[in-house]
Amino acid sequence: MEPTLDSFLSFYAERIGGPFPLSLLPPDRPLHWQGQTLFGTARGTEPLYLLQSTIDAFLGAAPLGTFSVGFWGHGLKSHAFYYQRREPWCSLFLRLPYGGLEHDNEQAAHRIRATMDWFAGFLPIVSERARHCIVVDSLGDALFRIVLTDGRVIEGDGPLFEPGRGPAEALGPLLEGA
């Protein structure tokens, strides 16, 4: 039997230690099983963006409305939780380590949960106060660029969010409503 979005939500809660924030799912697009424990808008012929080498293609060529969420693993080391989203106002490519031989899954689960809970609060703010937002956090390589409605740019080359440290200092003006 093919997994369902409900089975993903149960798997996430069991593995990550809390519920996936439902506000991060697209309310108006059905999600299809992509394989393993990954769900998204892609169907058959559309590419999945699962490797480090696909980040640029995702940011530049993935159709608007592309969305993926879930877990996928390659080989013995490259296992991750994915949250990818292409909208007119944002391009998000999260590939956070989880699983594989070299990962501390308890620590990874904490980071994933904290990151996704934080994003559930952050995305409504950025969608109102920014023209565009790019966030990439892929197995340690990270960058963000946010163009505010007044033209100011907030950018950096580190993770947008790290548990215990909160949002990057550069986001202060955005999060404070400047």
Image: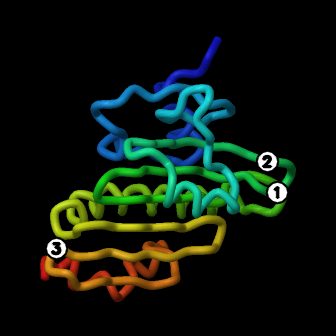
> Contact (CB < 8 A) between labels 2 and 3?
no
Q: Which residue is at the front of the view, 95 or 65? A: 65
> Contact (CB < 8 A) between labels 1 and 2?
yes
Q: Residue at x 39, y 76 (%)?
A: 145
Q: Nearer the viewer, mark 2 or mark 3?
A: 3
Q: Position of residue 4 (x, y in %)?
A: 52, 22
Q: Position of residue 172 (x, y in %)?
A: 26, 84
Q: Earlier in the sequence, mark 3 or mark 1?
A: 1
The residue identified by callout 2 is: 74
The residue identified by callout 1 is: 77
Q: Nearer the viewer, mark 3 or mark 1?
A: 3
In the depicted structure, whether residue 81 falls above or below residue 34? below
> Contact (CB < 8 A) between labels 3 and 1?
no
For mark 1, give the secondary structure.
loop
The residue identified by callout 3 is: 149
Q: Which residue is at the front of the view, 131 or 5? A: 131
Q: Amino acid at mark 3?
A: Thr
Q: Which residue is at the front of the view, 145 or 19? A: 145
For mark 3, give the secondary structure.
loop
Q: Residue at x 42, y 44 (%)?
A: 20
Q: Position of residue 28 (x, y in %)?
A: 28, 31
Question: On the rendered structure, is 160 left or right of 176?
Answer: right
Seen as rendered, the residue at the extreme front is 61
Question: On the rendered structure, is 53 left or right of 166?
Answer: right
Picture disc at residue 160: none
Q: Amino acid at mark 1?
A: Lys
Quadrant including the C terminus: bottom left
